[in-house]
């Protein structure tokens, strides 16, 4: 779902070819991309386990607020690492959701409920500053840094050319070659997509928060997170009730945040989301991610997000992947605290269990059944594509033959958006 099937790239070579050499010249980018995604999930699972173990320590409780800020900084740096590794922000969003959920769960390790509420206020202030000031500032700084690096590369090339006599002659003949390039202005659409991507991950994580608390309470007998945090089973309902009651106020906060970003940065968030709604409604493919037509005027790392149009399909994939990664993390916690009752030891070794091969087969079949059910429900019920009524004349395809703007689309020339090549 994240990575729809693409054509296999065949690299042409000269000379005679055999069957083995022909196979060696075939590079499957889809398999390469998916292996990177699976490897990134393994890294995130290990780091979330480390975050859980750190939240169980006495140092976390003693330096509670400092630890919360430290986890926030870790999330920023780790997201940048994943973005550099995977190359697409859409692939990093499930990792951000899971890290936020683990961080919210770790706040239950506070010494009392008052510290828990204070940590919630601190996290809210950090999220507001991140979306309004921090993320746009980091993007602008990175853009300026890349520009300076381009200037430095041109400076090094110029110094090497001066040492060469022929290069010096060329330099005198063509002085315009060494003029510093003007920095290209960044498209506002890229900033809007990045900001809304951050909002989507934070929103999904916060909607998951009460469900996660109830899940931890339900699995307390086997996982033991409440005992590690010194929380009684009867006290979990207070944390779940607090997270549930804060959903509506946080959604109202996000509404104001969208208006603040529009006024402060001049981003047309509402117009862009309106345009995304139109593109999703008029999509040519049932699954929007399978559409090969991407907007090439924006950065490669956010084209997949723009292609998904922040639609229900995007949130389905984001939620499904986040739940899978979180369950993987909880499973590791269960194995770390599960005693081996058969052998009478305190540590359970899953590789020494004779039922492991059968459990793997059962889980594989169960995953296949879930995959089939999701595809069937999505294609047959949820995402049934509507037929687009259009007329064709000498000018081409007309979605509005009467000359009226029935689509009610914003005028991008007045909003500062680039048309782009799709």
Image (tube, rainbow, N blue to C red):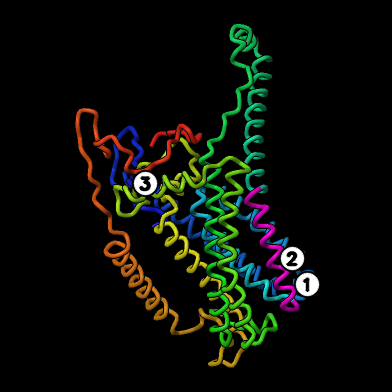
Nearer the observer, disc 2 or disc 3?
A: 3
Q: Earlier in the sequence, mark 2 or mark 3?
A: 2
Can you say which quadrant of the picture contains the N terminus? bottom left
Vertical arrangement, residue 201 with respect to residue 53, above or below: above
**The label number, if any, that marks residue 97 in the structure image:** none
The secondary structure that most of the magenta stretch takes on is helix
Q: Where does the image place residue 205, in percent across and percent down from the top left? A: 55, 65
Q: Quadrant of residue 124?
A: bottom right
Nearer the observer, disc 1 or disc 2?
A: 2
- Gap in Å between the C-alphas at discs 2 and 3? 43 Å
Crowding at dot 3, Cα within 10 Å, few <14 / some 14-19 / many 20+, comes out as some
**The label number, if any, that marks residue 67 in the structure image:** 2
Q: Are marks 2 and 3 in contact (CB under 8 Å)?
A: no
Query: In the displayed structure, does residue 303 sit left or right of residue 43?
Result: left
Q: Quadrant of residue 406?
A: top left
Q: Quadrant of residue 348?
A: bottom right
Residue 116 visible here:
yes
**The label number, if any, that marks residue 279 in the structure image:** 3
Can you say which quadrant of the picture contains the C terminus? top left
- Gap in Å between the C-alphas at discs 1 and 3? 50 Å
- Gap in Å between the C-alphas at discs 1 and 2? 9 Å
Q: Earlier in the sequence, mark 1 or mark 3?
A: 1
Please tell me which residue is depicted at 28% across the width and 58% down the height of the picture.
Answer: 384
Residue 43 visible here:
no
Query: In the displayed structure, does residue 274 sit left or right of residue 255?
Result: left
**Figure disc tally:** 3
Label 1 SS = helix
Magenta stretch holds residue 128: yes
Please tell me which residue is depicted at 59% across the width and 78% down the height of the picture.
Answer: 241
Please name whichever residue, 108 or 49, is drawn nearer the observer in this view of the structure: 108
Q: What residue would you read off at disc 1?
A: 59
Q: Are marks 1 and 2 in contact (CB under 8 Å)?
A: yes
């Amino acid at each position: 779902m994240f990575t729809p099937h693409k054509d296999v790239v065949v690299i042409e070579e000269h000379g005679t070819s055999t069957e083995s050499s022909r196979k060696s010249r075939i590079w499957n980018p889809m398999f390469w991309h998916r292996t990177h995604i699976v490897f990134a999930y393994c890294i995130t699972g290990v780091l979330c386990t480390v975050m859980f173990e750190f939240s169980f320590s006495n140092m976390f409780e003693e330096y509670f607020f400092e630890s919360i800020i430290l986890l926030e900084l870790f999330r920023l740096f780790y997201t940048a690492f994943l973005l550099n590794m995977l190359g697409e922000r859409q692939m990093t969003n499930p990792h951000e959701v899971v890290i936020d959920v683990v961080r919210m769960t770790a706040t239950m390790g506070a010494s009392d409920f008052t510290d828990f509420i204070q940590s919630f206020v601190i996290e809210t202030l950090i999220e507001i500053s991140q979306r309004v000031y921090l993320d746009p500032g980091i993007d602008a700084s990175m853009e300026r840094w890349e520009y300076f690096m381009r200037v430095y590369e041109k400076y090094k090339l110029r110094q090497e050319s001066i040492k060469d006599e022929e290069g010096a002659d060329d330099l005198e003949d063509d002085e315009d070659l060494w003029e510093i390039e003007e920095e290209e202005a960044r498209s506002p659409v890229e900033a809007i997509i990045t900001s809304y991507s951050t909002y989507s991950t934070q929103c999904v994580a916060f909607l998951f928060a009460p469900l996660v608390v109830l899940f931890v309470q339900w699995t307390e007998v086997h996982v033991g997170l409440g005992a590690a945090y010194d929380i009684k089973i009867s006290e979990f309902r207070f944390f779940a009730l607090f997270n549930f009651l804060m959903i509506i106020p946080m959604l109202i906060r996000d509404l104001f945040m969208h208006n603040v970003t529009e006024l402060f940065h001049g981003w047309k968030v509402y117009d862009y989301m309106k345009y995304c709604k139109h593109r999703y409604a008029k999509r040519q493919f049932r699954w929007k991610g399978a559409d090969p037509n991407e907007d090439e005027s924006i950065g490669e790392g956010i084209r997949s997000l723009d292609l998904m149009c922040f639609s229900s399909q995007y949130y389905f994939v984001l939620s499904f992947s986040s739940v899978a990664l979180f369950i993987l993390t909880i499973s590791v916690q269960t194995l770390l605290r599960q005693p081996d009752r058969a052998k009478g030891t305190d540590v359970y070794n899953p590789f020494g269990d004779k039922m492991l091969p059968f459990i793997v087969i059962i889980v594989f079949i169960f995953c296949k059944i879930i995959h089939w059910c999701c595809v069937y429900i999505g294609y047959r019920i949820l995402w049934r594509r509507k037929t687009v009524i259009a007329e064709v004349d000498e000018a081409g395809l007309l979605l509005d033959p009467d000359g009226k703007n029935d689509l009610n689309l914003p005028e991008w020339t007045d909003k500062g958006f680039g048309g782009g090549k799709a």
